[in-house]
Amino acid sequence: MPQPSVPSDPIASITAQTAAEIAESVRDLVDTGKLAPGAGLPPVRALAEQLEVNRNTVVAAYGLLVQAGVAVTRGRAGTKIVDLQPLPQEGFANITGMVDIASGNPDPDLLPPASKALAQLAADEPVLYGQPVIDPDLAAWARKALTTDVGDAELTVTAGSADAVQRLLADSLTIGDAVGFEQPCFLTTIQTAQAAGYRPVAMPVDTEGLTVQGLRAALDEGIRALVVTPRAQNPTGVVISEPRAKALRDLLTDYPHVLVIEDDHFWQLSGHPYRSIIPQDHPRWALVRSVSKSLGPDLRVGIVGSDTLTASRLSTHIRSGAMWVSHLLQRLTYLLTSNPETPAKLEYAAAEYAQANARLVAALAAQSIAAVSDDGVNAWINLGTIASPIVEALSRRGWLVRDGAEFSLDHTDDAVEHIRVTIHQLSTIQVEHFVADLTAILAQEGS
Ligand SMILES: Cc1ncc(COP(=O)(O)O)c(C=O)c1O
C-alpha cells in the first residue's frame, strides 16, 4: 500500500480562518497520519500570525480540539496531540523464564471444566438476528442469583465487567468529566478512564474499603459517577465493612445525580457478604457481576442490574454496536453455572484462594512483613519502602510481581511501597522460596 508523503511541517498546509475550521484542519492532519500522537501544536501567537487571524480564534480552536479529546494542554509545555501510552494490563507479561506472580488470574485448574457444556452447545440450534438478546435460561438464572440484591431491576448482559463499566460511564459522561475511582485501583478501570478522556479523581481505600473522606472530597470536586469494588478490591483485597458502607450510603443520599457503579467481580467466590454503598431509592446505580473469576475470563460475560434509565441507555448502546453478547458464550455460561457439580467446585475454589493467601500472609508476618488479602485472588504486600528497586531485585531472582505504583492513579498514596502478588498456583516450596527471597532483599535494602 502506498505510504502518504509527510510534509516537513504539516501545520503550514492549514489555511483555515475560523476556530471551527482550524480545529477541523488539525483533525484532518491527525486522522491522515500527518500529525503524529504527541506532536506539539505551534504556540498560539505563531499560528495566529501564520493564518493572519486573531489569537483568540486560535485559542478557541485549541479549546475545541481539547474538548474533542484530540489534543491536550500541558500549561507551559503547550498544546499537544493526544498520545495514549499503553498502560500495564492484567494477566499480561511477556517475560519468559520467570515465575509469573503478577497476573491476577484465576487458577485454570479451579475453573469448572467446560468439555461437557461445549458438547451440549454443539447440539444447539444456531441463533439468528431478531432473537431475544439475553438467553432465556441465563436470564432466569441471573434473575434468581441477583434478586436479593437488585430486586426486580432490569438486567443486561455485557462482555464482562470491563465492558459494562466502560459503557456505563460512556452513557453518562463526556470527555473531561470527573469520575471517582478507588485508589489504588484495578488496572483495567484506569485504562478505561484514560482512553475515554475522563478526569479521574482518586478516592483512597483503607482496610474497611473506600474512605468517607475520600468520597466526600471527590463529590466536592464534582464527580458525576464513581466505580467501587464492594469486596475483593483489586489490588488490596479489602472488603467494605458494614459501618463504612452505611456511612458511604448516607453521604451519597445528598448526590442523587451521581451514577454509582459497583464492580462486584468476586461475587461467586467471595467469603464475605455483599455490602452495598448505593442508597435506598438512589436514581442512578448499577451493580456489575462478571463470571470471569469463577467460570473463566474468556467467557466475557457480565450481568448488570441497574435503574431503568441506566439499563435503557446501556442496552441501546449495546444494540448499536456489538448488538448482543454471543449466545454461544451466554449459553456456555448458563450450562457451566447450572451444572449441579458447579456449586461444590466454586466452594472448593473459594477455599483454595482464601487458604493460599492466608498462608502467604502468615508466612510474611512471621518475617515482620505486613500483607493483606481479605478477599480475592491477590495479596497486597506492604514493603515499607519504595517498591521499584525491590521489584527489580525480585526479578533478578526470577519472580515477576506487580509494582503497587501501577495501581495508583496519581502516585500520592503508599501504593508505591507495595507489591501485588497472585500466588495460588505456586507449590508450598515455591511460596517458601518467594518469602525467603523477599525477606533477604528487604534486609539487604535496609542494611
Ligand atoms: C476489580 C475487578 N473487576 C473486574 C474484574 C473482571 O473483569 P472482566 O469481567 O472484564 O473480566 C476483575 C478481574 O480481575 C477485577 O479485579
Image (cartoon, rainbow, N blue to C red):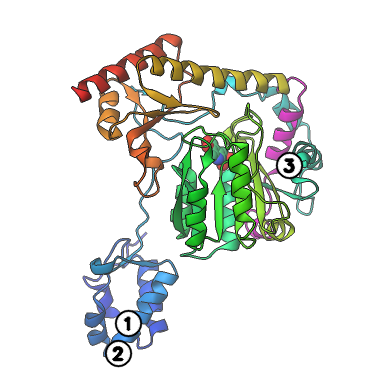
Report if residue 318 lies within the magenta region.
Answer: yes
Pick whichever of labels 2 and 3 is earlier in the sequence.
2
How far is disc 3 from disc 1 in space, using C-alphas?
52 Å
Q: Label 2 amino acid? A: Asn
Residue plotted at (31% across, 68% down): 34
Q: Identify the residue shown where x is 39% and y is 44%.
A: 408
Magenta region, residue range: 316-342
Q: Which residue is mark 1?
A: 58
Query: Residue 25 occupies which quadrant of the picture?
Result: bottom left
Residue furthest to the top in view is 429
Q: Nearer the viewer, residue 162 or 202?
A: 202
Q: Label 1's element?
A: helix
Answer few, some or many: residues within 10 Å of disc 2's Cα (few below 14, many 20 plus, some between 14 and 19): some
Q: Say if residue 160 shows up in the picture.
A: no
Q: Position of residue 383 (x, y in %)?
A: 33, 28
The answer to which of 349 and 47 lies nearer the viewer is 349
Residue 275 locus on image (x, y percent) = 65, 39
Q: Is residue 392 left or right of residue 312?
A: left
On-image quarter of the C terminus: top left
